[in-house]
Amino acid sequence: MRAFSEHNPIAIFMHFMLTIIIAMFIQNPIILLLALFGSILYYAVTFRKISAKMLTFWGLLFLLISLINPIFSHKGETVLLFINGKAITLEALFYGINNGIMILSIMIWFLVFSEIMTSDKVMYIFGKFSPRLALLVSMSLRYIPLYRQRAGIINNAQKTMGLYKESNIIDNVKGGIRVTSSLITWSLETSVDTADSFAARGGELKHRSSFSLFKFRKNDTVLIIISIVLFSAVISAQAVGVLSVDYYASGNFFSKLSFGIIAIMAYSAYFILSVIPFITEILARK
């Protein structure tokens, strides 16, 4: 059995987009928890491990996003406490937690997406009808890890020059500004070189031919069909209002969730959709 990352780039791209679209636009906590669960599973199998530093970053990001909504939105009936005369409600807190799960799951999905969808795969998908878009997308995905690596190089170079001798907030802020300035300059120079190289190789020619090692096989077709069917099942449930949740409505929060036959089928469909990459990778490695 082929690993998920070894499928045709078109099949991989469609599966990722369908999974992420549901997580972005359906504000159902169960759907979002399934999205987060699937993204963490596939992140672990793709990067082999989840570092403590990454877990800390995810936790702080989730906490920050979750607390922003109840601080600025005071709608809701269940008041938890007052801060400077402003009510912090349970409904606003639940909605903030929902947003935190959504953003965190989408971020993890895109981290895995940027790792799997290499520049040659992006060029294979977009290169024929829009070379500039293909270049833009491939550069964007490439710069996510590249910026982090270059920032570390610049930071280490400045330390060898004798900077950061004093460990205080002001010195750290100045050092961060220097690193950011150098990183922006370096990145702009690289962008210009990449664009010139793209034009010199005939990237903007209308009838430019291309070569690719990727082949579209039967299991790629099966993956696309399964993804579309599962996506359609979830969207259909959302269209009839089964997955809709009003976070600020009165009453018990958990009573607002639907657990009817249609809802359970939708939850099951999205669960399968989100764990397909993880399952295929595990089976391929056995």
Image: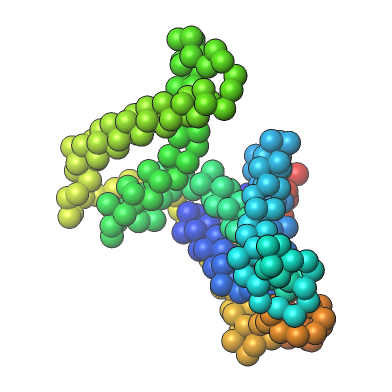
| Residue found at x 71% / y 84% | 249
Residue 176 sits above or below residue 22 on the image:
above
Give residue 204's position: percent from left, percent from top.
19, 49
Horizontal side of 148 relative to 53 (left or right) equals: left
Give residue 283's position: percent from left, percent from top.
73, 50
Residue 46 sits above or below residue 86 on the image:
above
Residue 267 sits above or below residue 147 on the image:
below
Give residue 238's position: percent from left, percent from top.
62, 83
Q: Pick whichever, 9 or 38, lies toward us.
A: 38
Query: Which image quadrant for residue 201?
Result: top left
Residue 264 sits above or below residue 86 on the image:
below
Q: Quadrant of the C terminus?
A: top right
Give residue 72's position: percent from left, percent from top.
60, 65
For the rendered model, the colour scheme is rainbow
On the question of residue 96 being in view, the answer is no
Q: Farthest bottom residue? A: 240
| Residue found at x 76% / y 85% | 250
Q: Pick whichever, 83 or 21, lies toward us.
A: 83
Horizontal side of 70 relative to 113 (left or right) equals: right
| Residue found at x 73% / y 36% | 52
Q: Pick whichever, 196 or 78, lies toward us.
A: 78
Q: Pick whichever, 54 or 180, lies toward us.
A: 180
On the question of residue 119 being in view, the answer is yes
